[in-house]
Image: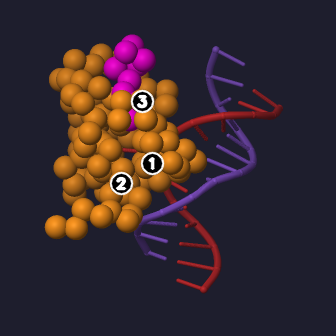
Chain colours: A orange, B red, C purple
Amino acid sequence: MEKESNSFFDKVYEVANQIPYGKVTSYGAIAKYLGAVRSARIVGYAMNCSHNKHIPAHRVVNRKGLLTGKHHFAGTNLMQQLLENEGIEIVDNQIQNFETVFWDPSNEL
DNA sequence: TGGTTGACTAAGT
DNA sequence: CACTTAGCCAACC
């Protein structure tokens, strides 16, 4: 039951799990919370393996609020469907009112 | 052990 | 204002 996650990935998973319902965040925000703003790419890389974990990766988008990683989901618009199911409006793969639904772990945690 | 990759971000053209 | 280039850093082969 070791929760000591030495890997950067596991740290990302913990933060992603703390994303509240109906909210989204960016890779850079998670990286910033982990103290590695420049490792935003690593966060996205970690999400690549999130399928094995129970991580709401659909709540994590890039800084522009664009669903860049939707291609990695099962369906074509599965990621968008999940977000819309949480009350988030998405048009052209871009989150509307991004600032409204944006959740910054560094600010909330 | 070393080199490539990538669900990013910021800056430049 | 939109596209291009460069820097970043950890995991993967």
- Residue range in magenta is A96-105
The quarter holding residue A88 reads: top left
Total numbered circles? 3
Chain letter belonging to callout 3: A
Label 1 is placed on what type of residue? Answer: Leu
Chain letter belonging to callout 2: A
Disc with the residue nearer the chain's start (1 vs 3): 1
Q: Which residue is mark 1?
A: A34
Q: Which residue is mark 3?
A: A107
Image quadrant where one finds the C terminus of chain A: top left
Asked if the residues shown at circle 2 and circle 1 are in contact, with their CB atoms under 8 angstroms apart, the answer is yes
Label 1: which secondary element: loop
Label 3 is placed on what type of residue? Answer: Asn
Label 3: which secondary element: helix
Residue A102 x %, y %: 38, 24
Q: In this rendering, would A81 be left or right of A64?
A: left
Disc with the residue nearer the chain's start (2 vs 1): 2
Q: Is residue A99 magenta?
A: yes
Report whether residue A24 is seen: yes
Q: Which residue is mark 2?
A: A11
Residue depicted at x 34% and y 20%: A101
Residue C4 x %, y %: 70, 38
